Image (tube, rainbow, N blue to C red):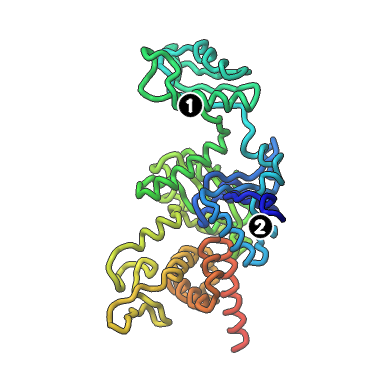
């Protein structure tokens, strides 16, 4: 291939063979550890059914290349019974699909116009950039506009033209313009708005703000779908988004992510949700923590073991069959524990409750013992495989299940 024929460098990847239940949120969760994601979308039919493929756009090209490298090294990943495939996205190969998924829209959301603006005045402004087929301009009881509107243009080009010329501008007379610049952007469906809220929460939590609205729920028995769980947890507040998945280590158990509209509602759900039993299984409800939050919690400063603090928050600590043990360098000073295994130990500790039914046969009594034993078993794993377990939850659960199975097999041989 000649130099000018090579596919363009891109930060986009194309993911195919996705399970039917896989959502844009699931896709974001699966790939966000590789780098900052600009956009993420699972292609769907007009009825909302997944087409089995999706697109992820990273801010940096190297993140997309890292995904390809990691997935190729795994030699085929099974997700929800499907062997998924990942490749760099070439716009020339799938032009039609990309337009359907991310670029073609005609509906625009509008706000930040003067309080005394009329529907006629707003329409006169918009038609300068293309034919408007409909305009939704809600009015309050006192006759004043509610402050937002939706406009549907006849063509995608007209919608883009309006956005490019009006967004961030002050298109009304100076006497009517408010303090905020005019806002016009692609109109979002309810699901897209929920996804944006989820990403906003992620960003806020990365900045250290306590917007605790996302919850992680485990120990959900099979047979309870999103509708049933929604009916249960909506009693505690307004649910913005929900995703349900199958536990990779136990196909008879499920997990779920729920995002509430306010931190107060999420707090009530954590308090009361842990008292709920489904088919004899007590639900385990906790706040969701992204990877950066978990890493920040370890940054207490200083070296050595801190009593009362779980292992993954301590540096300079090693684990043995009898408990924790400090490590020192030859000079006698404390040595920070290997970063990758510290991250891995933290993730295994978080996953421990999902394997609680197997603790006894595995020879452990609590989460700390479980995490210590499993992480020790990972000591001889290749570095690339360790990184895959840290970055991909379903790879981690698959490996944990394998460790438990191997341990049980060894016990049977000894007997």
> Is the C-beta separation of discs 2 and 1 under 8 Å?
no
In this view of the protein, which residue sits in the foreground, 5 or 152?
5
Identify the image quadrant of residue 341. bottom left
Q: Position of residue 176 (x, y in %)?
A: 39, 14
Determine crowd level at label 1: few under 14, some 14-19, many 20+ residues with C-alpha closer than 10 A.
some
* Secondary structure of the residue carrying numbered label 2: loop
At a point 53% along the width and 63% down the height, the residue shown is 354
Query: Quadrant of the image for the C terminus?
Result: bottom right
Residue placed under numbered mark 2 in the picture: 80
Number of numbered callouts drawn: 2
Name which quarter of the figure residue 77 lies in. bottom right
**Looking at this view, is 307 or 297 the one in front?**
297
Residue at (63%, 18%) from the top-left corner? Answer: 133
Could you say which is closer to the camera, residue 154 or residue 292?
154
Q: Which mark is residue 167?
A: 1
Q: Quadrant of the N terminus?
A: bottom right
Work out whether 328 lies above or below 357.
below
- Find the residue positioned furthest to the bottom: 414
* Res 134 seen here: yes
Q: Which residue: 35% across, 50% down?
A: 208
Q: Which of 32 and 276 is in front in this view?
A: 32
Distance CA(mark 2)–CA(mark 1): 42 Å
> Label for residue 294?
none
Tell me where residue 290 appears, x and y as whole percent: 45, 54
Q: Which of marks 2 and 1 is in front?
A: 1
Would you place residue 176 above or below residue 319 in this image? Answer: above
Q: Where is residue 68 in the image (x, y as percent from the top left)?
A: 61, 59
> What secondary structure is found at the residue carrying circle 1?
loop
Q: Where is residue 45 in the image (x, y as percent from the top left)?
A: 70, 39
């Amino acid at each position: 291939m000649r130099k000018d024929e090579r596919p363009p460098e891109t930060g986009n990847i194309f993911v195919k063979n996705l399970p039917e239940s896989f959502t844009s949120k699931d896709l974001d969760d699966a790939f966000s550890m590789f780098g900052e994601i600009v956009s993420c979308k699972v292609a769907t039919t007009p009825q909302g059914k997944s087409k089995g493929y999706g697109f992820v756009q990273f801010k940096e090209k190297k993140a997309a290349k890292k995904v390809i490298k990691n997935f190729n090294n795994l030699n085929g990943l099974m997700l929800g019974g499907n062997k998924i495939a990942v490749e760099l996205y070439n716009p020339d190969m799938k032009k039609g699909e990309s337009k359907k998924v991310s670029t073609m829209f005609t509906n625009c959301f509008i706000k930040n116009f003067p309080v005394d603006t009329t529907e006629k005045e707003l329409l006169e402004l918009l038609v300068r950039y293309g034919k408007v087929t409909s305009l939704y301009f809600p009015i309050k009881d006192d006759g004043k506009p509610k402050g937002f509107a939706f406009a549907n243009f006849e063509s995608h080009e007209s919608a883009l033209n309006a956005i490019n010329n009006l967004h961030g501008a002050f298109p009304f007379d100076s006497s009517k313009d408010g303090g905020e610049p005019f806002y016009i952007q692609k109109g979002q469906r309810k699901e897209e708005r929920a996804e944006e809220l989820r990403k906003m929460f992620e960003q806020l939590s990365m900045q250290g703000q306590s917007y605790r609205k996302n919850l992680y729920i485990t120990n959900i028995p099979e047979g309870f779908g999103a509708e049933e769980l929604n009916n249960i947890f909506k009693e505690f507040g307004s649910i913005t988004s929900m995703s349900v998945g199958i536990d990779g280590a136990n196909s008879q158990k499920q997990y779920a992510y729920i995002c509430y509209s306010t931190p107060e509602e999420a707090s009530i759900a954590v308090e009361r949700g842990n008292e709920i039993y489904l088919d004899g299984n007590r639900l385990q409800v906790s706040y969701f923590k992204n990877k950066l939050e978990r890493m920040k919690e370890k940054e207490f400063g200083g070296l050595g073991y801190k009593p009362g603090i779980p292992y993954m928050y301590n540096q300079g600590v090693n684990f043995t069959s009898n408990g924790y043990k400090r490590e020192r360098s030859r000079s006698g000073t404390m040595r920070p524990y290997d970063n990758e295994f510290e991250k891995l130990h933290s993730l295994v500790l978080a996953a421990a409750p999902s394997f609680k039914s197997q603790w006894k046969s595995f020879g452990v009594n609590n989460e700390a013992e479980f995490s210590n034993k499993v992480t020790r078993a990972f000591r001889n794993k290749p570095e690339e495989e360790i990184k895959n377990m840290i970055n991909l939850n379903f790879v981690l659960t698959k490996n944990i299940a394998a460790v438990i199975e191997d341990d049980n097999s060894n016990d049977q041989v000894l007997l």
